[in-house]
Image: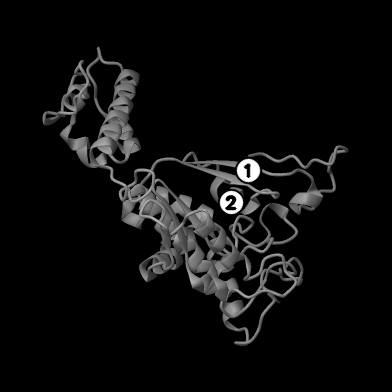
Amino acid sequence: FLLTSHYYYSMVVFDILEGEYGSPTPTPPIVVPLDLIPQLPLQGHGEDLIVDAELPRDLSRNTVLTEWRKACERIYQRASIKFSTDGFGDGVTSVITDSRCNQHITANGSYERAVRLPVAIRGAKKAGAGSSMSFPLIYTVEDRYVDLAEKKILPKAHTRSYLNRLKNKISALPADAKGVPLTDDSDGKGGEDTMGSRGSFTAAVVGVAAALKGVDMIIGGQCVNVFCAIRPPGHHAGREVRAMKAISNGFCLLNAAASAALYATAPRSEGGLGLKRVCVIDFDVHHGNGTQDILCSTQDSRFLYVSLHAGGAHINGYEDPGESDDGLYRHSL
C-alpha cells in the first residue's frame, strides 16, 4: 500500500510479509508516510491527515483512506501475532476492584449495598479470576488514576456545580452517618433511593478511576477486556442531577462508563488517549439516561451509545404524562 502526497517525501517500508510467517505467497510490503508512524495506534489521526493532504489529481481520496484503513488493520494483526504473549493482551481478561468502593454505605434495606461487591468478587473468583496470568484479579487502583479522574475527567462528564454540590454535601456528613439521601434536588425530592455516607464521594471517584485504569490496560495491550467490580453504580448519573427528567439518580453518583469513554477520546494534551470513536453498550433493566445525557446530548460524533433495557416510564423512572397506551416510553438513542 502506498500512501503519499507531494509533501510526504520520507517513507518507510514495513517488512510485514505473509511469507515471513510461513505463507507460500508473500504479499507486498506496507508503505506508509513516515509522518504517520506515531499515529499507527490511532487510525483516526492518520485519516485526518489524509483528508487534509494535497493529493495528486489522479489519486482518489476515498481510495487512499480505504488503503490506509487496510494497512492499519494489517499492521495491527501482524503486530498482535508477532508480539502478543499470555501477559500482553492475547486472551487476557482482567478484573479490577478496590476496597475503597465499600466506603459507600447505604441503608440496610437498600438494593444497592456493600454486600454486592464481595459477592461480585466471589463470583469472579469462581469463574477463575486470580488463578492465572490470563485472568488476573487486581485489588488496588493507583492514586494517579484517582487524581486523573477527579481533576481532569470527571469535570468533562459532570457539571462543576453538580460535582461541588455532591462533594460538599458528603463531606459535611457525620463520620457515622449512613443511608443519607445524596442527590435530592432543591425541593428535597428525588434522593430517596440514592443514599450514602461520608465515604461515598471517595468510593465513586475510585470507581471511575478503576474504569480509567481498565481503558489504559486495554489500549496498552495488557489485556483484551476488563471487568470493573466497583460501586456505587453510575449509568443514571448525568451531567446534572436527575438527567433527562428522571425521577431520581437511581443509586448513581458519578458515571464511570461515560468517564471512561471521555478519557479514551480526550486529546493527549488533555490527559486522554486520543481515540477517535468509542461505542458504549449498556444492558440493564433500566435505560442509562445519565450515560446518554453525558455522551449524546450534543450529537457528538465520537460516541455511539446503545442501551438495551425494558420499556415503560414505571420501569425507567421517568415522569411521562404522555406515555403511550402500550406502556412503552420511547426516546432516542
Q: Is residue 91 left or right of residue 167?
A: left
Q: Where is residue 159 drawn, in percent x and y?
A: 55, 62
Q: Secondary structure at mark 1?
A: strand
Coloring scheme of the render? one colour
Residue drawn at point x = 32 percent, y = 18 percent: 63
Q: Amino acid at mark 2?
A: Thr
Q: Where is residue 168 drawn, in percent x and y?
A: 57, 78
Residue drawn at point x = 64 percent, y = 56 percent: 236
Closest to the observer: 273 or 79?
79
Q: Where is residue 133 drawn, in percent x and y?
A: 35, 54
Give the label, 1 or 2, closer to the camera.
1
**Quadrant into which the N terminus falls:** top left
Q: Amino acid at mark 1?
A: Ser
Q: Earlier in the sequence, mark 1 or mark 2?
A: 2
Q: Where is residue 87 drawn, in percent x and y?
A: 31, 51
Q: Which mark is residue 291?
A: 2
Closest to the observer: 91 or 333?
91
Q: Which mark is residue 322?
A: none
The residue indicated by pointer 1 is: 307
| Above or below 61: residue 283 | below
Name the outermost residue toward the right: 325
Query: Can residue 158 be spotted in the picture?
Result: yes
